[in-house]
Amino acid sequence: MPARRPGRCRAAAQARCPGRTLCPGRTLCPGRTLCPLTGGTARIFYTFLGPRIGQRRFTALSTIVLVVPLLWLGFAVQDASTPYGTMVMIAALCGIGGANFSSSLANIGFFYPKQEKGNATGINGGLGNLGVSVVQLLTPILITSSVLAVGAGQKKANGSEIYLQNAAFVWVPVLVVLAAVAWFGQNDLQVASTPFSQQKIIFKRKHNWLMTYLYVGTFGSFIGFAAALPLLIKTTFPAYSVAAYAWMGPALGALARWAGGWIADKLGGARVTILSFVGMAASIIGVITYLPAGSDRGSFTGFFLCFLAAFFFSGVGNGSTFRQIPAIFRGQHLKGLTEGTPRHAAALRQAEIESGAVTGFTAGIAAYGFFFIPAMFANFSVTSAMWGFVGFYASCVVVAWWFYARPGAEAPS
């Protein structure tokens, strides 16, 4: 018998969610769906806006603007009469925070030579991904601290007091500092200044879409599993603490991304990408093996260790796919050209422009994994959804091998 599916909150038909502080687990709650959808969509626009406006100005402005939804959220959760629709709107605005990730990745390639691009994007992306686990780890601690509280606390059903506003307010000074660092410490690189007319060519490039497909498999899995794991623990192994375990997978995946970029610089991105998908498929099969089934209660230890392995391999793949992108577009544009000639220089610049745009675009599309993976668990049994992921990873192995890794591949990377 397949593992049971996560329950759905009956607040769907109500004007507001009465349990928004401790949601019983409606996977497709509008607040949960809008946040990743706005985040993923904003990533796509941010990818092209940064090089157009200037990365220093754009990074500073896109960082400081996040103070608005956080302040709004901090005050809204203190008022029990806040309409559910307002909470959904705030969640949607908070989702644009992830868009900064794509804007920085679209620019970072201009700073590093070919042999260091994988390591550079791996560190950049790993630090960004680490934010997922940091928030999951710190939030349960922050909301119980009266020392940090600004405003009144909220009463739980058992009479204890929590301070939900802390989870929002604590990031406000951090954002102000980071915006100032970007404004005063970064530069608007002239070489990275690119109008949309030169960037939009990527939508005609086959390898943009192929690498988007692969990155959905790596980063899409990472961010989707980060969103779904807490709910899976709660519904499948309810005896175990979500707060104690949920942050570990995203932390491991973020750290593995650093290693993935570095290893890909040494061994080649396509080879490491294939290894990551094979590892992810094997890990998910392990997760399925340890799920409860019928009278078998399953094994939380096996389930969790296999999930950690899935996070690890997804992190490695995150780093290696971003190593592949600049290698692919360099190879495509510089083929047959002599180094040092004007045509070579022009082709190199166009390759860098397209690599940056593709890197940001793939990150934007893959961010929708934060929505689609929990949606899979909401609409199918856990085991059916897991087998679907295994089949998808197998198709990614075929794509990566055929186009990028086999002898005579079209775009070896």
Image (tube, rainbow, N blue to C red):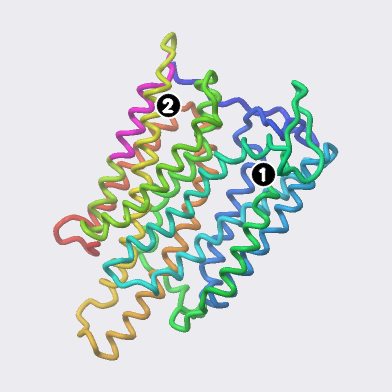
**Sequence-wise first label, 2 or 1:** 1
Position of residue 257 measured from the top left corner of the image (x, y, whole percent):
37, 51
Quadrant of the frame with the N terminus: top left
Instruction: Provide the major secondary structure of the magenta segment.
Output: helix
| Residue that appears at 44% across and 38% down | 249
**Which residues make up the magenta segment?**
279-293
287 vs 50: above or below = above
Identify the secondary structure beneath mark 2. Answer: helix
Tell me which amino acid carries mark 2. Answer: Thr
Quadrant of the frame with the C terminus: bottom left
Whether the residues at callouts 2 and 1 have beta carbons within 8 Å, the answer is no
Which of the two residues, 358 or 310, is positioned nearer the viewer here? 310
Distance from Cα at disc 2 to Cα at disc 1 = 33 Å
Position of residue 347 measured from the top left corner of the image (x, y, whole percent):
32, 81
Position of residue 170 measured from the top left corner of the image (x, y, whole percent):
67, 49
Tell me which amino acid carries mark 1. Answer: Ala
The residue most toward the right is: 81
